[in-house]
Each structure stands twice: as C-alpha cells, then as structure tokens.
Image (spheres, rainbow, N blue to C red):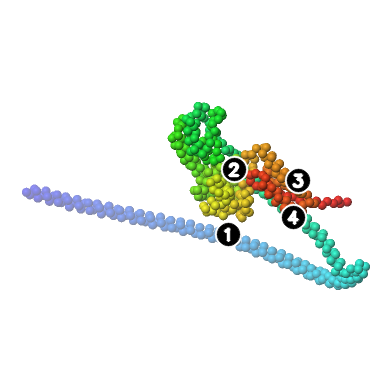
Amino acid sequence: MIETYVLIISILLSIIVGFGVGFFVRVIRHEESLKKSREMYENIVEEGRKEAEEAKKESILEAKKEIHDLKKETDADIRERRAQIASQENKLNQREEQLNRRTGNLDRREETLLSKEERIDLRQEQLEQLNSEVEQTLKEQQAKLIEISQISKEEAEKIIMNEVREKLGLEIATYIREEEEKAKLEAKNKSKNIMSLAMQKYASETTTETTVTVVDIPNDEMKGRIIGREGRNIRTLEALTGVDLIIDDTPDAVVLSGFDPVRREIARRALTKLVQDGRIHPGRIEEVVEKSREEVETYIHEAGEDAVFRLGIGRIHLEIIKMLGRLNFRTSYGQNVLKHSIEVAFLAGKLAAELGEDEIMARRAGLLHDIGKAIDHEVEGSHVDIGINLATRYREPKEVIDAIASHHGDQEPQTVIGVLVAAADALSAARPGARNESVENYIQRLQQLENISNDIEGVEKSYAIQAGREIRVIVKPDEIDDLQAFKVAREIKERIEQQMAYPGTIKVTVIRETRATDIAK
C-alpha cells in the first residue's frame, strides 16, 4: 500500500517537474522569438528609412527634370510667340505701305478723273453744238427733199417702213421655215431612234398559221377505220368538233379544215389520240373529244397566264386571262394574235420607257389592245367595240380603254399610252414576215394603190411606200391649190376604202410643191 502511494507521488512529482521544465523551456523560446522579432523590426525600419530616402532623392530628381522640361517648353513657346508677333508686325508694316501706295494712286486717279471730267464737259458742249448744227442741216435737207420729191416726211417714212417690212418678212419667213424643217428632222430622227431602240430590244419569232391542220396517220388502212362503217365515225367526229375531215389520196395524212382554230385544235388532239389508241367508234370518239376539249381549255388558261406573267403587268381578271389564251388560236392575216399582242406589249413598253412614261401600263394596254378578237365571232360589232366593252366591264384603267379604242384610228388617242400602242401595233403588223401575204398579191396591192391615186384629176404622180401603208401623191400646183389638196387626199382615202381590202391602215399624203428660182449674177 505504501509503495503504491509512493509510486503515485513519484508520478505526480514527475508530472509537476515535467510541466515546470516545459514552462521554462517555453519561456526561453518566447524570449528568443521576441528577440528575433525586435531584430526583424529594426531591420524593416532601417530598410524603410533607406527606401524613403532613395524615393525622396528620385522625386527630387524627377521634379528637377520636369521643371527643366517645362522651362525649355516655356522658352520655346516664348520664342515662337515672339516670331509670330514679329511676322505680324512685318505684315502690318507691309499693309501700311500698300495702303500708303494705294492712297497715292487714288489721289493721282482722282486728279486724272477731274481732268477727264473737264475734257468730257468740253466735248459735250462741242457735241451739243454739232447736234444743233446737224439738226438744222437735216431740217434743211428734209425741206429740200420734200421740195424735190413732192412728198411729205410721213409719206417717205411709210415707203421706207414698207420696204423694210417686206425684207424682214421674207427673212422671218425663211427663218421660220428653216427652224420648222430642223424641228421636223430632229423629231423624225429622235422618233426613229426611239423605235429602233425598242425594236432592237425585242426579237420575236415569225409565226403564221392557216385554216387547215394536217394529222399524220401510220398507214392508209387507218383512213378506213377513221371513216368507219357507212361513215359513222367521221360523221360523229365532225359533229362533235365542228371541223371538216378531208380524207383524200394524200398518203399517210388527214386534213382538218375549219375557220375556228380552237375547234381544229380539239379535233387534232382527239384524232391523234384515236389513231394512237386504235379503238375508233362513236362512243370512244365522244369520250376522247370531251377529254381533248378539257385539255384545250386548260391550255388556253395556261397560255393566258403565261402571257401575263412574261410581261409582268400585275393582277388581271380571270375572264380576261381566258380570253388572252383564246387569242393563241386566233390569227389575223396569218399572224398569231396572242404573239402579236405580246410583241405589241413589249414594243409599247420599250417606247414608253424611252419616253419616260409608265412602262407597265403601256405593256398592259399593248397586251389587251386586240382582246375583242377573242370573241368577235360570237358577239356583234367590231373587235374594237367589243374590246372597249370588255375592258370597261372588267374595270381596266382608262389608258387601256383609250389604247383599245384608238389603235386602228377609229378615234383620236387621248393619252400618250394610246399613241404608243398604235405605233407598236403598226410596227408588229408591218415587219417582214409577220403577216402571210404572197409577193404577187403584195405587188398587185401596191399597183392598185398607185392606180387609184393616179386616176384623180390634177395628180402628177404617186408612190406607194412603207409596204403599202402610205401613199404619197404629188399634185400639179397650177391646177390644185392648198384647199383642193385636202379634198384630193379625202377623195383618195374614200376610193381606197371602197375598192381595196388591206390590213391595218393606209396613210394618204398629198404634196403640192411650188418652186421659185432665180439666178444671181
């Protein structure tokens, strides 16, 4: 037991001694650490003091340098200002010298002007004296002239004025005539230039059509099948299409004849399908004809839409589009009317563009100018009247209606667009190959045109020009005066309308020429 207590006490003592030794060791280490910290602090303070001194020295050097630079800049500025002041002083001195010189010049000029004024006054007095003497002399001369000529002064002035008026009248008339000729020549050249530019920008294919259509067949045996037993097949086909089928000795061909191109196209498509299919009997013919009629109607609508789209004229009524498509199967003197209308629209648009007018409206009017021809075989009246009614019904612009009404000269055009469409229509119809006409008929028509004109009393000679679209008639000036020339033109126009059949219009120009010649020696 005692040993245990002794052990415990010894352990406690050991612990106490250990704590004591550790405390003293820690105290010693703390003092060493404080000593190191003091040394470090002193070192830091010493380094800071050194750095502060170095920074102070650097700041002083920089300040001195800056002061030196500022002093240099200030000195340079002062020198520059002094130079500018000196330059200004020199300029002022020079200006003062110039002013002094100008003042001297002005003084001298003033003296010169005073001297000139004195001379002018003296000269004026002399002129007044001479003027009075001249007037006195003129009065004496006039009195002598009156005494010699036995006429008064007023009568002499009247004679002189009449002579001057006659001379000036001739000169003025000559000048006016020359200017008119220049203006006409310039207008003609400009119009030719504009038309040539418009025509160069459009090249249309030449299209001519006839009143018959030929359908190829594989052999002559097919002709019998087309005719059918006792001709029932051909009668059915003719009754359904309204077209005559001509089956003759022509090998491998059947001719479809009819004046309605839409019906001919329906018959052509139907017959082509029947020949390809081989089954030809009345029931099949009715089915194929109806299908072909639907295809043609669709084609007509597409042709009208294509024309409107190509020209870019905006929205247009559906019925007008259908009628435009029908024009693709309408011909005028062999010329396809739809292609003619497209050509007229393009030419009118180019002419309008050259003149600064509305190109889109000109194209629209050109495309619709012959729209009445689409139904002129169904409705009473000329295609012009029909076209006016259609355009009015579907609310087309007034420019379009005016172009339709005036493109054949039935009335005077009220708008520039109407004039351009009429010109484009004439260009499209008159160009070579546009219309189907034999050379023999063409020559006969020109000869007939000249003969009609030559039969008029007082006509010296006549010439048919511009492919028979104009006749120029030269009359005898001693038999036909200016008023009778208009009567001759109207008489020729009426005879042409009564005796001739011709496409478009014919212009009659009567020329009465009076020549005055003299010889200067």
In this figure, which residue is indicated by the disc labeled 4?
483
Whether 145 is drawn above or below 263: the answer is below
Q: Secondary structure at mark 4?
A: helix
Q: From the viewer's perspective, is 50 left or right of 160?
A: left
Kindly identify the amino acid type of the residue bearing the numbered disc 2. Ser
| Image x and y of residue 230, in percent | 48, 31
Distance of label 1 from label 2 (alpha carbons): 102 Å
In this figure, which residue is indicated by the disc labeled 2?
332
Check residue 461 in the rendering and tell me which mark sits there, or answer none: 3
* Earlier residue among tags 1 and 4: 1
Q: Nearer the viewer, residue 403 or 242?
A: 242
Distance of label 1 from label 4 (alpha carbons): 105 Å
Q: Secondary structure at mark 2?
A: strand
Asked if marks 3 and 4 touch (Cβ < 8 Å), the reply is: no
Q: Residues within 10 Å of mark 4 (few under 14, many from 20)?
A: few
Q: From the viewer's perspective, is 463 left or right of 405?
A: right
Q: Nearer the viewer, residue 209 or 62?
A: 209
Asked if marks 2 and 3 touch (Cβ < 8 Å), the reply is: no
Distance of label 2 from label 3 (alpha carbons): 33 Å
Q: Residue at point 64% right, 39% down?
A: 437
* Earlier residue among tags 2 and 4: 2
Distance of label 2 from label 4 (alpha carbons): 38 Å
Q: Residue furthest left?
A: 1
In this figure, which residue is indicated by the disc labeled 1?
72
